[in-house]
Image: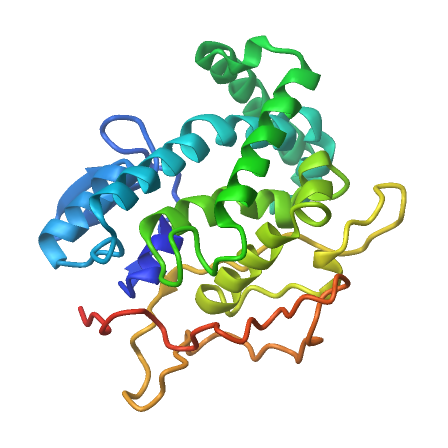
Amino acid sequence: METYLRMVDLPYQNYFDGKLSPQGKMPWIEYNQEQVCGTEFIIDFLEERLGVSLNESLTPQEKAVSRAITKMVEEHFYWTIAYCQWVDNLEETQKMLSVSGPLSDLLKWILSHLTGGIIRREMYGHGIGRFSKEEVYALMEKDMRTLSTLLGDKKYLMGSKLSAVDAAVFSHLAPAMWTLPGTRPEQLIKGELINLAMYCDRIRRRFWPEWFVDLGDFCYTDATEPSERSSRLPDLGLYSRTDTTQGDTRTSPSHAPRRPPSPDSDPTGHSLYDSDMDTECSDGDQLKC
């Protein structure tokens, strides 16, 4: 949801109080004291109320394909990544949790195991949790290979311009790219399916400029090798990409630190900068609100 809001250039305020929507779900938004729950309904609401859309240039057939891809990652691929993160690699995930205080280790353990138990229960209810570990990973690999094939050598899933499906796919591939070290999805995305890694970094550079990564993120490292890298992201409570001068097309949050220079290519020789990559903040006119 955050990635989508950044793509359409809508300022937003984060709240991390854990409050759920009246339907007991996340994400949800409040706009002019009106609450909307669920990513799909939120996007429809914003399109209707504010006139923002990433799918205007898509044909009816492309919109249908886009929806099919979105539902694959949200209703199927999501569960395989959740299994990898919160069940099969629970100890590594526990280390990444940002909890402070004298009882931080105990709280991390409680939180991670509580979440892991919830994920197991929900996966079983969904049906995918009734399969073996090997079968779950086989389903995950099929989904990732499907995404890689659909992307091919294109800039974004539906071609040269962003669409709403890119927010969904990027957000579900991000854990494989950055928070699951030494796992099968990391091996795939940084190995055979390198086009997905380049796709993820293309979107990260454009819409999450304050999110630091290094060149090592593009190369799979065996889990037995020591690593001091942290996968924690900064707490970004307020975000707006419009608080810059009109003459500056490379907009970014005023509080974002300057990124260090990066090498021009990854270990495969592919350009990380993509010569056709846009540097403006959006494909359409900026939305001020």
Q: Is residue 164 visible?
A: yes
Residue 110 lies, with reference to residue 217, above or below; the image says above
Instruction: Point out residue 115 in the picture as x, y percentages from the top left corner.
Output: 55, 26
Task: Return the residue nearer the eye: 192 or 1.
Answer: 192
Q: Quadrant of residue 51?
A: bottom left
Count of numbered marks: 0
Q: Residue at x 60, y 53 (%)?
A: 195
Instruction: Point out residue 105 in the picture as x, y percentages from the top left corner.
Output: 70, 37
Q: Residue at x 52, y 63 (%)?
A: 202
Q: Residue furthest bottom?
A: 247
User: In the visual, does 6 lie left or right of 123?
Assistant: left
User: In the visual, does 50 lie left or right of 3?
Assistant: left
User: In the visual, does 165 lie left or right of 189?
Assistant: left
Task: Return the residue nearer the eye: 38 or 59.
Answer: 59
Instruction: Point out residue 176 in the picture as x, y percentages from the top left corner.
Output: 62, 43
Residue 214 lies, with reference to residue 70, above or below; the image says below
Q: Which quarter of the figure is the C terminus placed in?
A: bottom left
Q: Residue at x 57, y 37 (%)?
A: 144
| Color style of the picture | rainbow
Residue 250 lies, with reference to residue 227, above or below; the image says below
Q: Is residue 113 visible?
A: no
Q: Residue at x 60, y 77 (%)?
A: 259
Q: Quadrant of residue 94?
A: top right
Instruction: Point out residue 19 in the picture as x, y percentages from the top left corner.
Output: 33, 37
